[in-house]
Image (cartoon, rainbow, N blue to C red):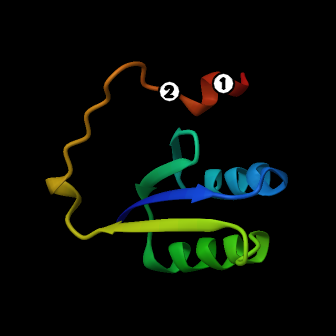
Amino acid sequence: MFVIITYDVAEKRVNKVCKKLKEYLTWTQNSVFEGEISKSLLMKCMYELEMIIDKEEDSIYLYEIGNPKNIKKRVFGQEKNFDELFL
């Protein structure tokens, strides 16, 4: 399945959430990850994220795309690349 995950977490947990999501998905821009992932890996990822976040303060949005063939992604402006930021 194809998913898009966005998050808004307190500054002290941002790096942990970003690092965890990078293990499973592709970073596309600040607080946004996307990519193909199996249902079981997604469940594992979400469980691990729940262990990091504070449910009273943080939020994570998960968008599951049933048919990724219908997604048209267009980037306006500069397309960011996670690897280029940290090399």
Q: Position of residue 80 (x, y in %)?
A: 50, 27
Left or right: 85 with respect to 24?
A: right
Q: Residues within 10 Å of mark 2 (few under 14, many from 20)?
A: few
Residue underneath mark 2: 80
Left or right: 45 with respect to 19?
A: left
Secondary element under disc 1, as helix, strand or loop, is helix
**Depth check: 23 or 52 in front?**
52
Secondary element under disc 2, as helix, strand or loop, is loop
Figure check: 55 above or below 77: below
Q: Residue 37 lies in what quarter of the image?
A: bottom left
Q: Residue 54 lies in what quarter of the image?
A: bottom right
Count of numbered labels shown in the rendering: 2
**Depth check: 86 or 31 in front?**
31
Q: Position of residue 44 (x, y in %)?
A: 61, 77
Q: Position of residue 16 (x, y in %)?
A: 78, 56
Residue 85 in sight from this viewpoint: yes
Disc number placed over residue 85 in the picture, else none: 1
Say which residue appears at 31% left-offset and 24% top-offset: 76
Residue 24 in sight from this viewpoint: no
Three-letter code, disc 1: Leu
Three-letter code, disc 2: Lys
Quarter the N terminus occupies? bottom left
Left or right: 59 with respect to 72?
A: right
Residue situated furthest front in the rendering: 57
Are dots 2 and 1 in contact, CB under 8 Å? yes
